[in-house]
Amino acid sequence: MANSSIATVDLSPFFIDGNEDGKKAAMEVISRACSEYGFFQIVNHGIPNDLILRAFELSKKFFSCPVEEKLKFGPELGAPVPAGYNNLDGNKEYLLICAPGTSFNVLPTNPLEFQRTLEELFICYAKTGQLVEGIINDCLGLPRNILKANNNDRRGDILFAFDYPPAETEAVEFGTPEHQDISCFTFVCQYDVAGLEVRKDGVWIGLNPTEGALVVNVGDVIQVIQAPLVTFISSYTRLMYLLMLNVYDPKNYFQVLSNNKFKSAFHRVVRPKGKHRYSSVFFYNLHGDKWVEPLPQFTSEIGKLPKYRGFLHKDYLELRLRQRIQPPLTPEERIRVTHYAIPS
Ligand SMILES: O=C(O)CCC(=O)C(=O)O
């Protein structure tokens, strides 16, 4: 299946000074894709293709090791995030990699150069993430670099190397069921086997792997949107007023804002028939105790009611993590960002 159903955006104009027409054209495509369904594909994004391919080859080698070898790289007991090798449900096995330097990171040293490659890839993804964040910032018409300035700590980002084993029956088997990501946005790179499906106009569409391309899925944070409280506290008086009311907590830098202007992409992974599927997935996240709610630019300033009540990002994260461990019995019970929706 060709990827004609996914908007493909060439990011090279953003690496060259002065190509304003190229930037404008790219931003138009991204804005439309994000407003309608929340995903697009990027090429010439700055991550060297040979690095991505090397990481895939090393992942494949690692996943082909005996399970007792892989389990040597399992998460540390009591680690806040299960960094390292995980195999929870038989639908997939994966390596979860936190930012280089994280004390509880567990990076396989087999093969030897794997660790360095994963760290290098993490840094490249984070850099491209900052570029994409800046573009989304401008597509939303927000003041320049607002999102970046207030989400500049990359310690919350997470890289996954996934291995989905072949389906065991003739029925459709999901490696990951339908969901939306809790991140700001997510990069997905498929190796040589398809399986990622995205929902567009109510229809599930399979995306073929395209060498050198990354699928970008908009996440819940951008849908609701985040921005610093201080951006709309235009005067000192207003800040004092909030301090007096005890509303302004310096920890809560972010307010969610797009109020559904940009959509969080629905997607899922179908396990392939007869072969393994490998993917590399990078979650560009909020770090820390951020407050998320629709921004005034998308509500009061344009005469619209907020579609979400505010929430602490870590509370939402906790609800979603709990449900990973104890999955709901029915899809309707699944916690999504609509948990915070204000009924209209
Ligand atoms: O492996 C993939 O292609 C996507 C995985 C995914 O959607 C997820 O982990 O949220």
Image (cartoon, rainbow, N blue to C red):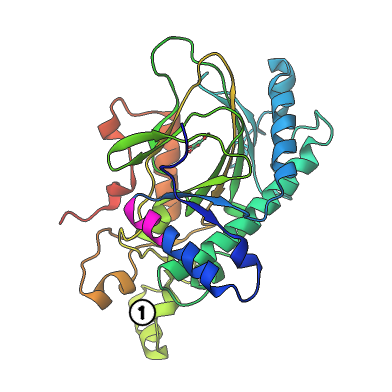
The verdict on residue 190 being magenta is no
Q: Residue at x 39, y 43 (%)?
A: 180
- What residue type is disc 1 on? Leu
**Horizontal and vertical percent position of residue 318:** 44, 44
**Horizontal and vertical percent position of residue 50:** 74, 42
Q: Residue at x 80, y 32 (%)?
A: 109
**Secondary structure character of the magenta stretch overall:** helix
Position of the C terminus by quadrant: bottom left
Residue, disc 1 = 242
Q: Residue at x 40, y 68 (%)?
A: 140
Compared to residue 163, the image places residue 309 above or below, namely: below
Q: Is residue 322 left or right of residue 115?
A: left
207 or 338: which is nearer to us?
A: 207
104 or 234: which is nearer to us?
A: 234
Asked which quadrant contains residue 236, the reply is bottom left
Compared to residue 283, the image places residue 228 above or below, namely: below
**Horizontal and vertical percent position of residue 9:** 52, 55
